[in-house]
Image: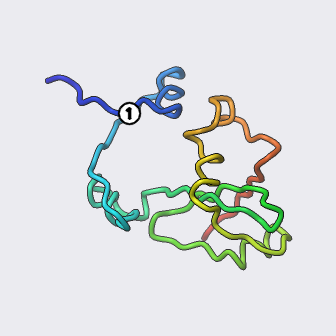
Amino acid sequence: MSEQKHPMTLAVRELQKHKVAFSVHLFDYLEKGGTAHSSKEMGVPEHAVIKTLIMENENKEPLVVLMHGDMQVSTKNLARTLNVKTIQPCKPEVADRHSAIKWEARRLLVPNARCRFTWKKAF
C-alpha cells in the first residue's frame, strides 16, 4: 500500500534529516475543534496532545507556551512568573511570524534571543 502524502514542513524535514522515527496523522480540520478534536481523531487522550500557544508581553516580545491539550494557561500567573506586566496571545498574523513553521530550521532546535523560554513543572 502506498504511503499517503502529507505536508512537508520544516519540522518534518528536521525529523527526516536526523533520522527520527515518526508517524503522520492527517485529519480534517474542525473550526473550534481544538485539542479535543485532534486527540479524538488521533485516538489518544487529550492530555497527550501538546498545544503550542504564541504569546507576547507588554513590550511585544514573543514567547512560546507548550502545554497539555486539556489544560489552560493563566496569563496572569505566567506574567507573574516571568516578572512582566502582562502576557496575552499574539494576533494570528503576529503568531504566524513567530511560529515554528515560519522559522528557519536552526531556530527549531536552538532558542534565539527574540524568544524567552521558561520551563516549569505543572505537577
According to the image, what is the colour scheme of the structure?
Answer: rainbow
Question: Within 10 Å of the Cα at label 1, are there few (<14), some (14-19), or many (20+) other Cα atoms?
Answer: few
Q: Position of residue 11 (x, y in %)?
A: 51, 34
Q: Position of residue 15 (x, y in %)?
A: 50, 28
Q: Which residue is mark 1?
A: 7
Q: Quadrant of residue 57?
A: bottom right
The N terminus: image quadrant: top left
Q: Is residue 109 left or right of residue 83?
A: left
Q: Is residue 35 left or right of residue 123?
A: left
Residue at 62% x, 29% y: name it: 105
Q: Amino acid at mark 1?
A: Pro
> In the current view of this chain or complex, which residue is farthest to the left?
1
Q: Quadrant of residue 65?
A: bottom right
Residue at 18% x, 23% y: name it: 2
Q: Secondary structure at mark 1?
A: loop
> In the current view of this chain or complex, which residue is farthest to the front?
93
Rendered position, 3 above or below 94: above
Residue at 43% x, 57% y: name it: 49
Q: Position of residue 104 (x, y in %)?
A: 65, 31
Rendered position, 9 above or below 60: above
Rendered position, 21 above or below 88: above
Label count reads: 1
The C terminus: image quadrant: bottom right
Q: Position of residue 38 (x, y in %)?
A: 34, 57
- Quick one: 1 or 103, which is closer to the camera? 103
Rendered position, 122 above or below 102: below
